[in-house]
Amino acid sequence: RAALFDEIVPGERYAALTGHPDIRGWFEWFLGDDVHLHRRKIIRHIRPGESGIGTATQAHYDLVYLRQGSERVLSMWIPLGDCPVEQGGLTYLEGSHHWALAAERERGDRPPAASITADLPALAEAHDARWLLADYRAGDVMVHSSYVVHASTDNVDPQGRIRLSTDIRYQRASEPIDWRWQEHWHEDDGL
């Protein structure tokens, strides 16, 4: 963990990946503007057999963590190597952006809890929806809005491989930026 937080996260090689001209250029093209990459970028490292609350990422949508900036932040999830379903990759709840956005508008200034639930099947049943997941390969990326409900599943890889992935967030540079996300990710950063 010391190497992760003290060397890798603030390191030049990780910055070169997350700020790569092809990635940055795609966000500039998609958003039609100059973009800002949030400095807080997360590297997920899930070992096989680690399970339960706090290991796999519970169901949530990103806006609940980015309340002090633009609601139009886009997240990019990048598997760092092949990531078959058994390794616990990213999963999306189909159609969830519709009800998450409606709930936000109805809630007003009252923020929701940070995560929705660890019970993914019950959440899908409550919304008559499916969890969508896939086998990911090195080079794949997933991009989603701050309203899409997503999670990860437990790593049950029979070959005992660790799942590595990273989350990065881009937005228009001209929109409000959540100042809390402008320091390197650290286990004690409070977010």
Image (spheres, helix red, strand yellow):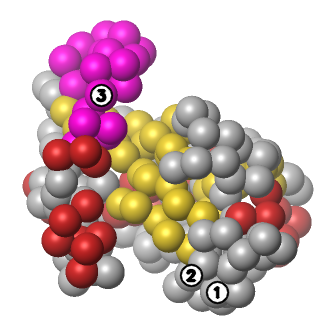
| In this rendering, the label closer to the viewer, 2 or 3 | 3
At 24% from the left edge and 14% from the top edge, which residue is drawn?
33
At 78% from the left edge and 46% from the top edge, which residue is drawn?
134
Residue corresponding to mark 1: 50
Residue corresponding to mark 2: 55
Q: Which residues are magenta?
A: 15-35
Quadrant of the frame with the N terminus: bottom left
Q: Position of residue 20 (x, y in %)?
A: 30, 28
> Residue 5, can we see it?
yes
Asked whether residue 17 is drawn in magenta, I would say: yes
The kind of secondary structure the magenta stretch mainly shows is: helix
**Disc 2 residue type?**
Thr
- SS at mark 2? loop
Q: Position of residue 124 (x, y in %)?
A: 81, 63
The disc, 2 or 3, on the residue closer to the chain's N-terminal end is 3
Q: Position of residue 58 (x, y in %)?
A: 59, 73
* Frontmost residue, 139 versus 116: 139
* Mark-to-mark CA distance, 3 and 1: 32 Å
Q: Is residue 73 above or below residue 159?
A: above
Q: Position of residue 57 (x, y in %)?
A: 57, 71
At 41% from the left edge and 37% from the top edge, which residue is drawn?
74
Residue corresponding to mark 3: 20
The disc, 3 or 1, on the residue closer to the chain's N-terminal end is 3
**Disc 1 residue type?**
Glu
